[in-house]
Amino acid sequence: METVVAQVFTGLSSASVLLLVAIGLTLTFGQMGVINMAHGEFLMAGSYTAFVTASILRGSALSLPVALVVGFLIGGLLGIALEATILRWMYDRPLDTLLVTFGVGLILQQLARDIFGAPAKEVSTPTWLSGTVPILGYGFPVTRLFIIALSALCVAGLFAMLRLTDLGRRIRATVANRDLAESLGISTRRTDRTTFFIGSGLAGVAGVALTLLGSTGPTVGTSYIVEAFLVVVVGGIGQLKGTILAALGIGIGRSFLESWTSGSMAQVLMLLAIVAFLQIRPQGIFTTTTRSLA
Amino acid sequence: MTAELIRTDDYLEVRDLRVSFGDFVAVDGVALTLLQGQVHFLVGPNGAGKTTVIDALTGLARGQGVATFDGEDLLGRSSHAIARLGVGRTFQTATVFNDLTVLQNLDIAGLRHRRRRSLWRARHGIPDAVAEAAEAVGLSHLLDRPAGVLSHGQKQWLEIGMLLVQDARVLLLDEPVAGMSAQERDATGELLHRIGRERTIVVVEHDMEFVRRYADVVTVLHAGRVLASGSMEQIRANPEVQRVYLGDHAEGVSNA
């Protein structure tokens, strides 16, 4: 029982980071049809933001909250820069965006290597997040609890924004039908840029959160990007609810598989499970169905 | 169209409009003067360039020439900028946000009328403009229904309702009655005349019976050019139109 609870919990916390990465991708992939391979490097930028903030604020209790805000902004600004300089010219050419953003990702990795050096950097956990909390007879690390709460908060905020605000309506209108949104006076270009900012910013937040779990290196993004895309595809492209379910399923599932076998074996089994799932439901968990004539 | 007909009202003026896709010239020097308070019909055989004219006027196709509404140039502007000038359109296949309810669809159409400050704020209640538009197109009782489950005809009405919420002064409608029942057609025709009193309505249509009953002015396009323009009677009496267009329908063969 105790190990089951522990596995669910560990899985939940890694699923939370995965979710933050994947939900940004769902937004950009779903809305703009852009396959952004550099999304993982936005996460890396977030991680280094946490590192830099921690070294400047030197153990201050504020360093993590500051890093979260700055990480969001840095991720978002990188996203806007990528959108404004390159991606805007290649909408509806997903394969080209894949290659170009992969290249951008490599450049950003090298940039990180030049600035911070190749060895991994450690960010010390703030004292208010150290220790464990006993729940159901198992001592949960506070850092992991914090990550779960952070992810839940971000996702809830995103949902509220999409459902309740005008900006959210604009975004949903643009996702649903670009031409129609334009003909209703919505600037889809501006909406795209805002969406890209938010999606990339969430990757930055994920990067900051990641420093609570392990060290930071130039290639930290690459280990997440593939899995994040799997989450997006399994969840159904552009479907936020599907993304959440898929992230939880993949995160917790892998956590269990890892406890039964080795890490690499768990990866193989997880991929097999995903391939099998997509055979049955190629469109992902959720899809849009209507009586549309078009 | 004589000069004294053009009063201080808003009108849409199109001169020498050309649209080409590569080597193919889809619209070849079209001129139109579209006045407020009249229901205009654009007719013509397939490939005459009717939809392309609408696309060019709403920024979906790149056109050359002159197209002004209320003194503002339309060509070269992006779609949303044209929509904000008050020129709205519908699409050939009823295009609405299928996942959203009727109310949400109408609501999105009203976005641009809200102040920028409200962008992040939640709202409550149904705005007057939305309620009025829903009433006008007869969808008041379906506000909470997802738009995806509406019948084809209802979707077309919803599209028109969205243009009303948007406060469009020019409505460019691409085959609004295609796929509608006879009853729905009549309802649509009457709706067009009702809302057309204060607006400029342009309808692309194939159904000549519908055109005959509801057109104030008919313009016949053929191979990207204006063949004739005038009342339905004048159009019918025009020998060239008979040869090129009505003849096709009557005999079911193409002219040689």
Image (tube, coloured by chain):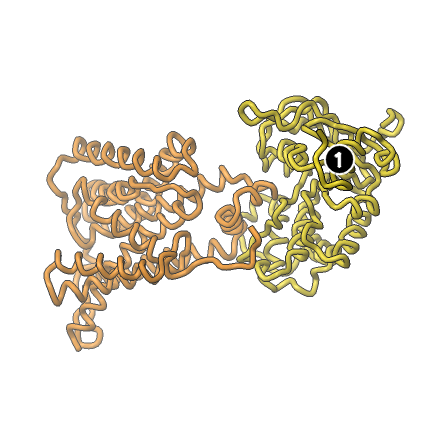
Q: State the orange chain.
A: A
The picture places residue A91, in percent across and down from the top left corner, at: 43, 37
The picture places residue A247, in percent across and down from the top left corner, at: 30, 59
A206 and A171: which is toward the camera: A171
Q: Residue at x 21, y 32 (%)?
A: A111
Relative to A129, residue B85 above or below: above
Q: Residue at x 69, y 23 (%)?
A: B29
- Counting every numbered tag in the picture gives 1
The picture places residue B21, in percent across and down from the top left corner, at: 56, 27
Disc 1 element: helix
Look at mark 1 in the image and give the residue it sits on. B245
A115 and A31: which is toward the camera: A31
Image colour for chain B is yellow
Q: Is residue A159 visible?
A: yes
The answer to whether B230 appears left or right of B107 in the picture is right
Relative to A152, residue B237 above or below: above
For disc 1, the neighbor class at 10 Å (few under 14, some 14 to 19, many from 20) is many
Callout 1: residue from which chain? Answer: B
In the rendered image, which quarter contains the N terminus of chain A?
A: bottom left
The picture places residue A285, in percent across and down from the top left corner, at: 37, 61
User: Picture quarter containing residue B239?
Assistant: top right
A177 and A224: which is toward the camera: A177
User: Picture quarter containing residue B77?
Assistant: top right
B66 and A43: which is toward the camera: B66
Q: Residue at x 41, y 43 (%)?
A: A33
Q: Is residue A63 visible?
A: no
Kindly identify the amino acid type of the residue bearing the numbered disc 1: Tyr
